[in-house]
């Protein structure tokens, strides 16, 4: 391990093992700030992506739930209000509730 103190101008340090020279950057804090900025930008992009998935998933779930409820109503009108028709309506209603929860999570 090589230890060196950095000045404002950086510097050149000789390696004690191989005898080669190593050029040190002038200010290491700028480099660390760049890494921090990249991490923050990556975290923000990830957050926006997750929010977009929630919105898209909520709309898809709402559309599928509405279709399922409509199928249940049609089945109830044509063949009677049996377990198939009522089940479609109940599962569709649960899908609507789930889509609302996805949208609320997005806030």
Image: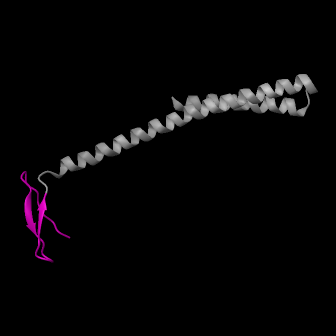
Residue 75 drawn at (x, y percent): 87, 27
Which is the main secondary structure of the residues drawn in magenta? loop
Residue that extends furthest to the right in the rendered view of this protein? 80
Magenta stretch holds residue 3: yes
Res 10 quadrant in image: bottom left
Relative placement, left or right, of 8 versus 86 is: left
Residue at 89% x, 33% y is 83
Relative placement, left or right, of 35 versus 54 is: left
Residue at 29% x, 42% y is 37
Residue 102 drawn at (x, y percent): 59, 32
Residue at 11% x, 62% y is 23
Res 6 quadrant in image: bottom left
Q: Between residues 64 and 3, which one lies in front from this camera angle?
A: 64
Res 81 quadrant in image: top right
Relative placement, left or right, of 8 versus 107 is: left
Relative placement, left or right, of 24 versus 69 is: left
Q: Between residues 85 and 4, which one lies in front from this camera angle?
A: 85
Q: Is residue 80 visible?
A: no
Q: Which residues are magenta?
A: 1-24
Q: Quadrant of the N terminus?
A: bottom left
Residue 103 drawn at (x, y percent): 57, 29
Residue that extends furthest to the bottom in the rendered view of this protein? 17
Q: Is residue 22 visible?
A: yes
Q: Between residues 3 and 18, which one lies in front from this camera angle?
A: 18
Residue 20 drawn at (x, y percent): 11, 72
Magenta stretch holds residue 64: no
Relative to 58, say whether 36 is above or below. below
């Amino acid at each position: 391990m090589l230890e060196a103190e950095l000045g404002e101008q950086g510097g050149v340090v000789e390696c004690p093992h191989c005898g080669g020279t190593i050029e040190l950057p002038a200010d290491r804090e700028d480099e660390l700030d760049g890494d921090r900025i990249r991490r923050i930008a990556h975290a923000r992009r990830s957050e926006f992506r997750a929010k977009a998935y929630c919105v898209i998933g909520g709309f898809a779930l709402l559309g599928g739930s509405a279709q399922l409820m409509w199928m249940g109503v049609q089945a109830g009108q044509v063949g009677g209000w049996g377990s198939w028709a009522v089940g479609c309506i109940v599962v569709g209603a649960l899908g609507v509730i789930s889509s609302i929860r996805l949208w609320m999570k997005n806030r």
